[in-house]
Image (cartoon, rainbow, N blue to C red):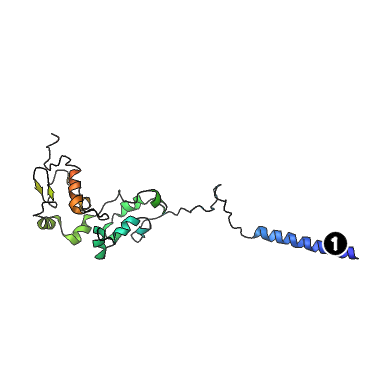
Amino acid sequence: MRSAKIGMAAFVCAGCLVAALAAAGCAPQAPSSTEGSNGDAGDQPVAVAFTWSAEADCAMCHAKEDASMTDASCLAATHEQEGNTCSTCHTDVQGLTKAHEGATPEDAVKKATKLRDTTIDEDACFSCHGSYDELAEKTASSTLLTDSQGTVVNPHARPDGEGHADQTCADCHVMHSDEPVTESAPAFCISCHHAGVYQCNTCHA
């Protein structure tokens, strides 16, 4: 009689063990710390595709540019104080969409985040600062752009037809840098007038 009771108890315990193992096999399993080496998720970051829009949080990747918005030594800070945002100046929807195709937040760590394939619509500049003609009047007495021969050029009244047609405000006025226009504007001129002479055909006949 005693051996029968022992056998019954062993049978019940064995049944409990089987049930427990079955339940454990169906429960959600946390990934181990070694997962990821064979393509599993593990501790690897998940790359989430980014889709650009005017409402996007630019600071998520463009940290340097975002910091310039509150840096008094940058022109961007002056614009931010007037209530402007990234989308006020960066209106090139087609260019911005293309530049961000396939981008992920972790790309910001791997690549430079400065936008190189987009343009700034000068109408955004003119809406606050006036036209080139109006600006030329304000800088008529400026001697900032003086070449090695003493020739002075009004920065907002550059000659047409001498390679200036594609130049924009942003070529001289660098928004997200603390480089002053007194340095950036002459440097831009010298990038073409490398001999320090503003008159054309003085270097290459």
Q: In this view, does 192 lie to the left or right of 41?
A: left
Q: In this view, does 72 lie to the left or right of 38?
A: left
Identify which residue is drawn at 24% across, 55% down. Answer: 121
Query: What percent of the width, then of the height, locates residue 36?
Result: 54, 50
The 10 Å Cα crowd at callout 1, few under 14, some 14 to 19, many 20 or more, is few
Q: In this view, does 192 lie above or below 144?
A: above
Residue 158 in view, yes or no: no
Name the outermost residue toward the right.
1
Looking at the rendered structure, the secondary structure element under dot 1 is: helix
Write down the quadrant of residue 200 in the picture. top left
x and y percentages locating residue 64 in the rendered image: 33, 55
Residue at numbered disc 1? 7
**In which quadrant of the rendered view does residue 55 lie?**
bottom left
The amino acid sitting under disc 1 is Gly
Q: Tell me the quadrant of the picture where the N terminus can be found.
A: bottom right
Q: Residue at x 78, y 60 (%)?
A: 14
Residue 45 percent coordinates (x, y) = 48, 53
Say which residue appears at 81% left-offset and 61% top-offset: 11
Q: In this view, does 196 lie above or below 52?
A: above
How many tags in the picture? 1
User: Residue 27 in the image: x percent, y percent?
Assistant: 64, 60
Looking at the rendered image, the quarter that the C terminus falls into is top left
Left/right placement of residue 174 relative to residue 39 reads left
Q: Residue furthest top?
A: 205
Report if residue 111 is visible in the image.
yes
